[in-house]
Image: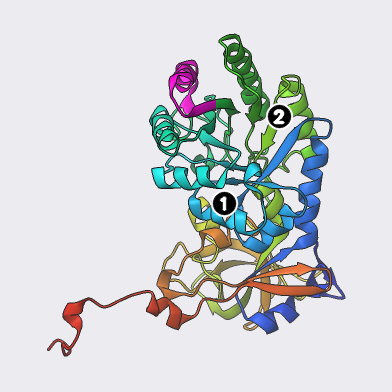
Amino acid sequence: MDHFAYRDGTLCAEAVTVAAMAKAVGTPFYCYSTATLERHYRVIAEALGGLDTLICYSVKANSNQAVIATLARLGSGADVVSVGELQRALAAGIGPEKIVFSGVGKTAAEMAAALAAGILQFNVESEAELETLSAVATGAGTTAAASLRVNPDIDAGSHHKISTGRREDKFGIPWTRAREAYALAARLPGIAVVGLDVHIGSQLTELAPFEQAFSRIAQLVRALRAEGHDIRSLDIGGGLGVPYGEGAAPPLPATYGAVVKKTVGHLGCRLILEPGRLIAGNAGILVSRVLYIKQGESRTFVVLDAAMNDLMRPSLYQAFHRIIPVIEAPPGITELPVDIVGPVCESGDTFAAARPMPPLAAGDLVAVLTAGAYGAVMSSSYNSRPLTPEVLVRGKEFALIRRRQDLAHMLQLEAMPEWFKGAGPAR
């Protein structure tokens, strides 16, 4: 469920018309709904009711500080994968005791910063990382709480670029080496083993992979405890999919919660969850204006002012996003197939191909739905296009939470070498 709907024939975000925001900030822009963010957080929390849980919002899904702060006020923690995300989470009001640090390539400097901040734990993904963390912690005269991420070799069935739990994926310590890795952690100075971590991928639309992975991890928890390891927490990651408008509808959080309770609820562990897309995905839209209607030899192109640099998912993953006009089409109108594309000089700059749409004209506004996760965070300034602004709505009010990047500022970030100074143009 989200809070984007037509009212009197015009698309609204909660009680604000999308057209009013477009007039105020220009297009393209991202728009997020506070009510949807809050609802999705609460639905997940309710699904795990009765268990000792900590929800650590996955900051990589949408790292705007206003979005993080909205969730922090509900009690959320944060799952971060860089020192930049760590600083964002802290600045947005999430306490360090609710922050877990994940990722396969943490640097020693990032580890030192996280230790100094006093985070809850590191999710360690290799023996080499474990040894580096040990050295950093002992050098700082402290102890690092560590949870080892174990790869259970489960194929989640999602897109290969967002699968993380198969034996050939780069994430985690192989299932077959898990007990050896824990034995190493127990021997290393500066390391306190506190738990186990597993995450098998993103945008999962079936529960069977979760049940397989969690059941396998439950066996490992019992084996590790028998060998003397104090496994107090279990980080089960995120990954539950959201409805993009095509394909099978993902399971409801309540059904997912039942699987969690069945497979690991009896272990007596504090459960850490890392939902990102599940919270932010349907809470955001990308609003764009039609520049041109271009008639090709056999196809009609709708050219938008948004592009692949603003929303990469369709180009990168061939992902499906519903696209709707901001002004509601009259009932019974005939839809015709069009290619919805952006202005970037790449054939891959396509949001949808042969997509049935009501008639559109230059100047019309459209909304790309379910764009709140992995949209703005993955955007770039390719073709020297400024980064897209972001807007947060709450009831009848809205606020600009990221300004449109200024072209002059983009140029100021660059510098000419000394050898160009005083030199005239080449002849």
Residue 274 screen position, x and y as percent: 64, 41
Element assignment for label 1: helix
Q: Residue flagged by tag 2: what amino acid is it?
A: Arg
Examine the rendering and report whether any part of residue 62 can be seen: no
Q: Earlier in the sequence, mark 2 or mark 1?
A: 1
Quadrant of the rendering where the C terminus is positioned: bottom left
Q: Is residue 220 above or below residue 274?
A: above
Question: Which residue is at 75% across, 81% downward?
Answer: 20
Total residue callouts = 2
Element assignment for label 2: strand
Q: Which residue is outermost to the top?
A: 226
Q: Which residue is outermost to the front?
A: 141
Between residue 422 and residue 406, name the one nearer to us. 422
Whether residue 199 appears in magenta in the rendering, the answer is no
Q: Which residue is outermost to the right?
A: 8
Majority SS type along the magenta span: helix
**Label 1 crowd (10 A; few <14 / some 14-19 / many >=20):** some
Q: Residue flagged by tag 1: what amino acid is it?
A: Lys
Q: Residue 270 got which mark?
A: 2
Dividing the picture into quadrants, the one containing residue 156 is top right
The region drawn magenta spans: 173-192
For discs 2 and 1, the disc positioned in front in the rendered view: 2
Q: Which residue is outermost to the left?
A: 427
The residue pinned by badge 1 equals 60
